[in-house]
Image (cartoon, coloured by chain):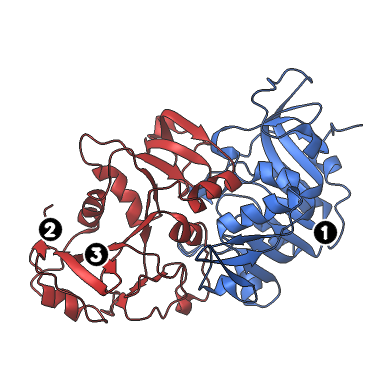
């Protein structure tokens, strides 16, 4: 069982055209930038990308610049301040790509549901809004809910602080965000980590993502971009 | 109207009067972040950030900045003793599950039933939902901090939201530059007016009929 890969390029080599790809991170924090750059170089097309945001100091817009993306699903695809725009916005305005805006908690829980083997869940979030369109509404214990379905992926690209060679992961501070749930919801989970340590070197009490969820690990330094530089 | 009413800072100061000792509070992006500067003396509140952090302190100074430690507005922050981290699904379970006592959100429109619109200006064509819908639906108390009217004088206190809604029947209290307005089953009750502002000024700047309670008072700031 080989999990340790020599480079981000090798780790993403088999991402295929039309694949659904989750990418962790909240802005630049916890975003697997080196894997994103490797995916851009690799060139797979017609991708569906699931991620919280694009253009908030993350590097995801390079995938739109390369015209590799067919559809984006996330909570913050459009930044509505500042003069800078993204390739995502240009392509969406031109009708070239599809964008699904989903409440952030619903993004996270749909991913969690997929990883946990659930068929969906009822949430109060989005009742009476555009998010409800086309979904079942149900009253449970006097409260209104809508049915949301799981989100799964062919590949998840995530970032951790430390990984051991079994793929057990720990994170740093708010760089955790979407990474642990995405790890559970993809056929192939690929983690870049600041540091890779020997198996047994991580305290079992503090491991956040059990290695069973992680198929590939690769060492990568954190990207230096900051939110407001983007 | 003799005055424009409160500045953004004074709106935040008035919102901060809603804080109680021990509350778990999530502050939205924009004017709501200013509320952290006006925590009443003698009380401790615990700030939640939906990117997976409970217990952040002030905004980090340049030499304190840790690139992996931000709040949900992307600002580098510091930690209070007892702070902890969790992933996004746990963070929104905390929010939806009623474990956040109060959220302060910005607003574009609030209706007389307490519907909130704050994620999209239709003329711009695009908007991002972020955590707003989960916070508005899940926090125990939703307080909105906003300007009372648009830049061209249109009311933001409306009969029905014409902008896309964030949540329906969600808002408890609205604090604007003109007034503090409570959403009740009977309608919108003007609890307090800003110094130099009358009830009639507030009514003139609002679309629905507002309720004037016998104990209407001027805000103490």
Identity of the residue furthest to the top in this view? A201
Residue under label 3, please give it.
Answer: B176
Mark 2 vs mark 3: tell me if same chain.
yes
Front-most of residues A40 and B84: B84
Residue B113, percent across and down?
A: 35, 74
Q: Are both tags, 3 and 1, on one chain?
A: no
Q: State which quadrant residue B48 falls in.
A: top left
Of all chains, the one bearing label 1 is: A
The chain carrying label 3 is: B
Residue A28 seen anywhere in this rendered image of the structure? no
- B103 sits left or right of A174 in the view: left
Q: CA distance from mark 3 to mark 1?
A: 47 Å
Q: Secondary structure at mark 2?
A: loop
Where is residue A115? Give x, y as percent: 74, 48
Chain designation of label 2: B
Question: Residue at label 1?
Answer: A19
The chain letter of the blue chain reads: A
**Disc 2 to disc 3: CB gap under 8 Å:** no
- Residue shown at 29% from the left, 49% from the top: B35
Quarter of the rendering occupied by the N terminus of chain B: bottom left
Q: Earlier in the sequence, mark 2 or mark 3?
A: 3
Q: Nearer the viewer, residue B45 or B107?
A: B45
Disc 3 element: loop
Within 10 Å of disc 2 (Cα), the crowding (few <14, some 14-19, many 20+) is: some
Colour in which chain B is shown? red
């Amino acid at each position: 069982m080989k999990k340790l890969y020599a480079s981000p390029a090798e780790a993403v080599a088999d991402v295929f055209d039309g694949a659904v790809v989750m990418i962790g991170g909240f802005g630049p924090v916890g975003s697997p930038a080196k894997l994103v750059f490797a995916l851009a170089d690799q060139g797979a097309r017609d991708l569906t990308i699931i991620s919280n945001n694009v253009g908030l100091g993350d590097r995801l817009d390079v995938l739109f610049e390369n015209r590799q993306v067919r559809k984006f699903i996330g909570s913050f695809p459009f930044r509505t301040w500042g003069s800078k725009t993204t390739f995502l916005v240009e392509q969406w305005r031109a009708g070239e790509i599809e964008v699904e805006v989903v409440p952030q908690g619903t993004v996270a829980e749909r991913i969690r549901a997929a990883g946990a083997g659930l068929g969906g869940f009822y949430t109060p979030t989005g009742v009476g809004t555009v998010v409800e369109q086309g979904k079942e509404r149900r009253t449970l214990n006097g409260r209104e809910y809508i049915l949301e379905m799981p989100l799964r992926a062919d590949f998840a690209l995530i970032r951790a602080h430390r990984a051991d060679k079994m793929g057990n992961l720990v994170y740093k501070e708010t760089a955790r965000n979407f990474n642990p749930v995405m790890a559970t919801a993809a056929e192939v989970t690929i983690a870049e980590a600041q540091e890779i340590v020997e198996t047994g070197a991580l305290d079992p009490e503090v491991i956040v993502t059990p290695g069973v969820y992680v198929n590939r690990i690769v060492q990568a330094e954190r990207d230096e971009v900051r939110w407001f530089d983007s | 109207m003799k005055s424009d009413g409160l500045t953004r800072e004074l709106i935040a100061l008035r919102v901060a009067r809603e804080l109680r000792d021990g509350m778990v509070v999530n502050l939205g992006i924009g004017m709501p972040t200013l509320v952290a500067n006006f925590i009443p003396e003698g009380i401790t509140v615990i700030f939640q950030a939906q990117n997976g952090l409970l217990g952040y302190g002030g905004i980090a100074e340049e030499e304190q900045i840790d690139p992996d430690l931000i709040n949900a507005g992307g600002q580098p922050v510091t930690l209070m003793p007892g702070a902890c981290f969790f992933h996004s699904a746990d963070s929104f379970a905390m929010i939806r599950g009623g474990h956040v006592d109060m959220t302060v959100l910005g607003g574009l429109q609030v209706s007389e039933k307490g519907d909130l619109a704050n994620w999209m200006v239709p003329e711009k064509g695009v908007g991002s939902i972020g955590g707003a819908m989960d916070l508005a639906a899940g926090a125990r108390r939703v307080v909105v901090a906003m300007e009372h009217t648009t830049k061209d004088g249109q009311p933001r206190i409306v009969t029905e939201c014409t902008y896309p809604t964030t949540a329906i029947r969600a808002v408890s209290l609205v604090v604007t530059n003109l007034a503090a307005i409570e959403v009740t089953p009977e309608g919108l009750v003007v609890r307090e007016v800003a110094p130099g502002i009358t009830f009639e000024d507030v009514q003139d700047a609002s679309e629905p009929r507002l309720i004037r309670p016998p104990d209407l008072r001027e805000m103490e700031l």
